Amino acid sequence: MQWETVIGLEVHVQLATHSKIFSGASTAFGAEPNSQACAVDLGLPGVLPVLNEQAVAMAVQFGLAVHADIPEVSVFDRKNYFYPDLPKGYQTSQMYHPIVGPGEVEIALDDDTTKRIRIHHAHLEEDAGKSLHEDFHGMTGIDLNRAGTPLLEIVSEPDMRSAKEAAAYLKAIHSIVTYLGISDGNMAEGSMRCDVNVSVRPKGQEAFGTRAEIKNVNSFRFVERAIAFEVERQIELIEDGGKVVQETRLFDPERDETRSMRTKEEANDYRYFPCPDLLPVVLDQAYLDHLRSQLPELPAEKRERFQQALGLSAYDASVLSASREMAEYFEAVHRACGDAKQAANWVQGELSGALNRENLSITNSPVTASQLGELVQRVLDDTINGKAAKQVFQALWHGEGASADAIIEAKGLKQVTDTGAIEAMIDQVIADSPAQVAQYRDAEPEKRGKMIGYFVGQVMKASRGTANPQQVNGLLKEKLDALL
Amino acid sequence: MALEDSHVRRAAHLARIAVSDDQASSFVEDLSRILDMVDQLQGVNTDGVAPLAHPLDATQRLRADEVTETNQRDTFQRCAPAVENGLYLVPRVVE
Amino acid sequence: MHDKTLTQLANALGSGELSSRELTEHYLQRIQHSGATLNSFITVTADQALAQADAADQARANGNAGWLAGLPLALKDIFCTQGVKTSCGSRMLDNFTAPYDATVVEKLKAAGTVSLGKTNMDEFAMGSSNENSYYGPVNNPWDLSAVPGGSSGGSAAAVAAGLTPAALGTDTGGSIRQPAAFCGITGLKPTYGRVSRYGMIAYASSLDQAGPMARSAEDCAHLLNVMAGHDVRDSTSVARGVPDYAETLNASLSGLKIGLPQEYFGEGLDPDVEKAVREAVRVYESLGATVRDVSLPHTHYAIPAYYVIAPAEASSNLSRFDGVRFGHRCDNPSDLIDLYKRSRAEGFGDEVQRRILIGTHTLSEGFFDAYYTKAQKVRRLIRQDFLDAFEDVDVLMGPASPTPAFDLGAKKDPVSMYLQDIYTIAVNLAGIPGISVPAGFVGRRPVGLQILGTHFAEAQLLNVAHQFQQTTDWHLQRPDFAEESA
């Protein structure tokens, strides 16, 4: 039987506010345990929440970026359950009236096509603390620094049909939130976490199969692997006559499998009800218009512009717009050199290669965008040839000079275009290579084209790479042919 | 809506309150009487009436995104039953 | 000294006739003498009180003392007080020293008041008789065999007995007005949102409101002047100017339109209480007010709606008491679930457990709409009843409670206890202000007249109550008890 995979994602994005969603405690990562858990975060008797305006603005910016409806009124609800990292015994969230309504995200697929994934809604909520299980005499330690950090939970429709689509969706969300600057998107530190709902159904069947929810998958790669495993597990189960049960599963990256979370806890009943300590959040049109006017150009728009206005290929446009940092770097190189294709080639070629080799991100590149832009410009205006350009790049990379021009000057890499100087070098090479000249003369005319390479190499060597290769080629041909 | 023993036990579990069998039956009795009284609500015609969560029709005020709190861990943990290295301790949680 | 009102004491301090230290020592002594009899205090903060008194005297000597500076007060033990035990009448918080001050406490401190201590109360403010306290019941100073009312029973008894000139209470379903009535003092529940709830341990967040309890409406006005106002730490507090409540106390009542809700004079009302209330209304007529009957048709649904909404909110508000970060923790928990379940079973008393269970049940799947959503709809109808009535009249009047204080131990069944709040509870659902003023006696036990106004009509309520107290002397009556321990 042919099976179809159906995937929906719930992405939790930590918003990059300075203070918590309901208190004035810092959200900085990595502080001493419980040093950033204030009275409100600890749920001390008598404390009350007050909503952070920046968390609201960030949620709305996301909504606007995914063309979502932003309802005028949204309401916070309490989700009630006991857990030691949940200080109040409830999580303040939005169940019935979320801040962001239905929207959509365009994802780029491998075959250079795009697909729209619908967003069901996105809501604001507070993060929980952390349980530390290393040994405290058989006890668990609770750190509530993270408690109250604002989260935007983005819930997709079950619109994805493969692990690759799910990963592409997650990347699209990642690039939107980082473009907007509403999250650092750091998955390793948990700034972005993802629950994956997976089900399978016979191809052509309309009804969805029973889904399993894989909790807390925290990398793009793990999302793909977790889904791949889970799909196979479900198909095998059904084909063997079994049934998928609706349950929560955990992905174990070490063993590359998902497994059922222990269900000693019978079905939960979260008893959602409107939080009486918070009032309805009302957003007017002027506020939305203001935030809309502040939106930066978003990845999809950038991709489109790179293709249409700059003439880049779909592939180049997609790679260069994938992250805000990459796009900003590329655009700075482009501004400096004026040639989009050359800028794209250098960013994706020499620069990306070097970054990959040393495992650096583009924000930590030793070569700045303006340095690279000047270098590309020097190739375009024939100051240096391509070979010298690579030398200059290496020198910039290793900090051997402040600018391309300085390195060109210091290393004497300026291209020699003076015909007289080149002719002198050619004459010398011809004089020093009687045997090769004889071979050239005796060769079949159609083979001479290849044989000229030897002479070009010698002349370039003599010029220490600085002679203009096209000029060398033309003049050599003239002079050798004159000897025939 | 009649209240059953299972309802009370489920509520006690959700609310994390230990109840003995004796207590459970006395809770069933008390809570049943309370719910019988509450059931009068079913006699009110509320067609077209919106629920009222707050007595005033006010809207949420927003706070500037500023860090205003300082570390008061030692003060706050003075009333904690068990702490070590700044962490609150609970019996081991198995994930 | 302790027969004087706050206003009289303020004048005595102002003229230098009395120092705050003398005053404070006097009340501390009275608390000490009456302690075992009334049980109205959970914690007495004598050292702190004397230090505050000295500071107030010093401030006065320096010429920068405000109106309330140096006046002793007592605080219901529901308000967090930095460095002082804050128990909420519960074993759960018997070991809890609050690490911060509630906003109202902060404001009263800033005004230079002296805090004598923390008063007894029904556990987590759940009760109408003060019999639900972990620290034992409070006796009514007018009749030691009677309850003082609840949940602010300790505050009411302490004021009535002259152990403090005034106290703070909180009112979720009548917890200021009913004990004020039972103890023959004046108690005001302000409009929801008028006074900050920050630092006041929450029972039912959409109903709770703090207010003053004192000898007279005038005293309440001076206290409310300090307590009221917007608090950036409480989202539900209202950003709205605070008038000077003392300034309008003497406005004329000529032409005042009084409504008598017919539902507040029906079955279940003690005939002697009714007589006292109707007599009080006649006093108002003599002051130039007109009286008419009005109807609040959903009155009888207020208690059912309240016993869905308040326990639902409470079940969630009280989840933070889990034995992890503060409060009672059971011995030797075998695992996490055991820690939660035993800590909470040991820490909470019966009534608190009942309300948590009711709230948990009514919010749970399959019951939510039938109970919670339905109750919220009825809540809107109840509020509308009041808004409609205030289209026609300025204030509503009626009894604060259907009977005078009942005997300790008289109401064993929870529902019959709940029905005590029939005249007070709808006010909290609607969020409007209400005041109870002494209006007579049934035997030795006081009767309270309840006056209700529309949202933010505190100034008017205090004016209306004050004018009554200018004409009558019910509020000046003192129990024999207070005379004996003098």
Image (spheres, coloured by chain):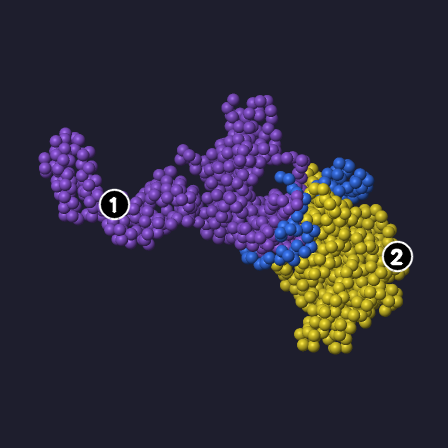
Asked if residue B22 can be seen in this view, the reply is: yes
Q: Quadrant of residue A198?
A: top right
Q: Colour of chain B?
A: blue
Seen in the image, is A165 located left or right of residue C195? left
- The x and y percentages for residue A118 are 51, 38
Q: Which mark is residue A385?
A: 1
Asked if residue B58 can be seen in this view, the reply is: no
Q: CA distance from mark 2 to mark 1?
A: 106 Å
Q: Residues within 10 Å of mark 1 (few under 14, many from 20)?
A: many
Amino acid on which disc 1 is placed: Asn
Q: B25 or A141, which lies in front?
A: A141
Q: Residues within 10 Å of mark 2 (few under 14, many from 20)?
A: some
Q: Quadrant of residue C144?
A: bottom right
Which secondary structure lies at badge 2?
loop
Amino acid on which disc 2 is placed: Ser
The residue that appears at 58% across and 22% down in the rendered structure is A240
Image quarter hosting the C terminus of chain A = top left
* Chain ID of residue with mark 2: C
The residue that appears at 48% across and 37% down in the rendered structure is A221
Which secondary structure lies at badge 1?
loop
Q: Quadrant of residue A36?
A: bottom right
Q: Which mark is residue C145?
A: 2
Q: Colour of chain A?
A: purple
* Chain ID of residue with mark 1: A
Q: Colour of chain C?
A: yellow
The residue that appears at 64% across and 60% down in the rendered structure is C230
- The x and y percentages for residue C416 are 83, 48
